[in-house]
């Protein structure tokens, strides 16, 4: 993006006022990585699946003003690379390059080749993310209304129960690949790095508190509550585009089922876990060792490139692979034969053994016999 210039103005144009009223088409996506997964059970039956990821990847895309749909405009923005102007409509883009009595509208006399069309703006961020994945109840005909209502209910309940500002948590409803009847309500903290708020949902008492707050918001104990939604429960200025899809009666039975929930940790999918470990490998030899671990049907490591500390002091060493509890695997390539590297390795590893760690040094695949001994012993 080139440098941009802003100028203070005392008023806005009619076009800008319309744009502010209509807003933009904003879509948010979450790319799951290494997550902790829990089943939300009511009795013995799983009602939903909860996942948490620290620093999950969130992508937000601006596809242009909403008014484009009404005017049959293509999605995205138009951008003049000659004068760095944003042009919101196709007509504005064509006018920008037309010649008039004083030359082209563009101050730098741009041609049509200088104007990019259908430009989509996006941001990537790393945020703490919690998802609640479930299927709509069998008696629900309008699934979109169910999941939209569930999304706004959980977002509002979370902000109230955790004493957060509305701007600190955002949410959206995402698809679940290859499962057409299920959706994923994604809640994420807007502050990169996270404040620990959404992580609290992985603790049963805090999750129950949010569910109780959700039931209170939806007038669960009030026989004279609103018909579908009101400004005392779900409606707000910020979700006005979803007002037609909000209906508290659709989600009340589902949330009441969760009022006596229990959380059960679920084993991570082995394929996803292998991909995460492989991505962390720093050499071809490390990847070969990981592949051999799988071929020998040994358990996958719990982590790769794990930094090991001596209490709260400085780090002692980085384990190429790590197994709980206190089993360290070092994958030593040719560089470790150098005298100064070998001496540094010995010092670090002696210190780890004094701290109670078990060590496996892998120079050949046969060295994995010692790992197998530890894992099976």
Image: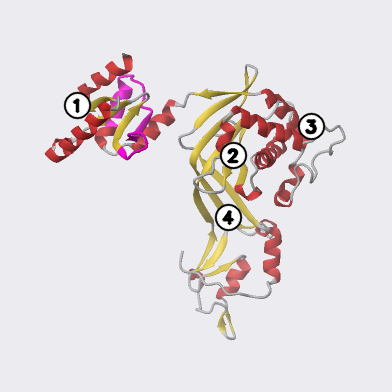
Q: Secondary structure at mark 4?
A: strand
Say which residue label 3 marks: 220
* CA gap, disc 4 and disc 1: 51 Å
- Give the CA separation, mark 1 to mark 2: 45 Å
Number of the label disc, if any, that sits on residue 217 = none
Range drawn in magenta? 287-315
Disc 2 designates what residue? 186
Of 152 and 263, the residue lying toward us: 263
Q: Nearer the viewer, mark 4 or mark 1?
A: 1
Residues at marks 1 and 2 touching, judged by CB atoms closer than 8 Å? no
Nearer mark to the viewer, of 3 and 1 = 3
Q: Which residue is mark 4?
A: 62
Choose mark 3 or mark 2, whichever is in front. Answer: 3
Q: Which quadrant does the C terminus fall into?
A: top left
SS of the residue at dot 2? strand
Q: Which of 334 and 87 lies nearest the eye of the viewer?
A: 334
Q: Earlier in the sequence, mark 2 or mark 4?
A: 4
């Amino acid at each position: 993006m080139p440098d941009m210039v802003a100028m203070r103005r005392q008023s806005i144009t009619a076009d800008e006022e319309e744009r502010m009223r209509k807003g933009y088409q904003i879509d948010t996506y979450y790319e799951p990585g290494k997550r902790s997964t829990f089943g939300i059970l009511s009795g013995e039956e799983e009602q939903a699946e909860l996942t948490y990821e620290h620093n999950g990847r969130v992508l937000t895309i601006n596809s242009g003003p909403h008014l484009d749909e009404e005017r049959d405009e293509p999605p995205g923005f138009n951008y003049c690379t000659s004068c760095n102007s944003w042009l919101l409509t196709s007509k504005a883009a064509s006018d920008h390059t037309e010649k008039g009595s004083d030359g082209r509208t563009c101050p730098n006399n741009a041609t049509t080749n200088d104007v990019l069309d259908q430009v989509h703006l996006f941001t990537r961020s790393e945020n703490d993310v919690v998802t609640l994945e479930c299927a709509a109840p069998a008696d629900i005909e309008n699934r979109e209304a169910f999941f939209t209502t569930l999304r706004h209910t959980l977002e509002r309940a979370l902000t109230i129960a955790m004493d957060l500002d509305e701007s600190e948590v955002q949410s959206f409803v995402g698809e679940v690949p290859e499962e057409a009847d299920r959706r994923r309500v994604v809640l994420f903290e807007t502050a990169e790095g996270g404040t620990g708020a959404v992580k609290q949902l992985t603790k049963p008492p805090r999750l129950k508190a949010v569910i109780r707050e959700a039931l209170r918001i939806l007038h669960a104990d009030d026989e004279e509550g609103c018909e579908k939604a009101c400004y005392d429960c779900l409606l707000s200025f910020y979700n006005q585009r979803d007002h037609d899809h909000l209906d508290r009666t659709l989600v009340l039975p589902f949330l009441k089922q969760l009022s006596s929930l229990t959380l059960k940790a679920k084993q991570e999918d082995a394929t996803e876990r292998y991909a995460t470990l492989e991505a962390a490998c720093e050499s071809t030899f490390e990847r070969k060792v990981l592949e051999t671990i799988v071929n020998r049907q040994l358990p996958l490591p719990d982590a790769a490139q794990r930094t090991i500390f001596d209490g709260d002091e400085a780090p002692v060493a980085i384990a190429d692979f790590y197994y709980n509890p206190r089993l360290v695997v070092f994958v030593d390539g040719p560089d470790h034969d150098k005298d100064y590297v070998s001496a540094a390795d010995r010092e670090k590893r002696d210190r780890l053994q004094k701290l109670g760690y078990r060590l496996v040094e892998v120079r050949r695949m046969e060295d994995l016999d010692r790992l197998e001994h530890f894992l099976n012993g």
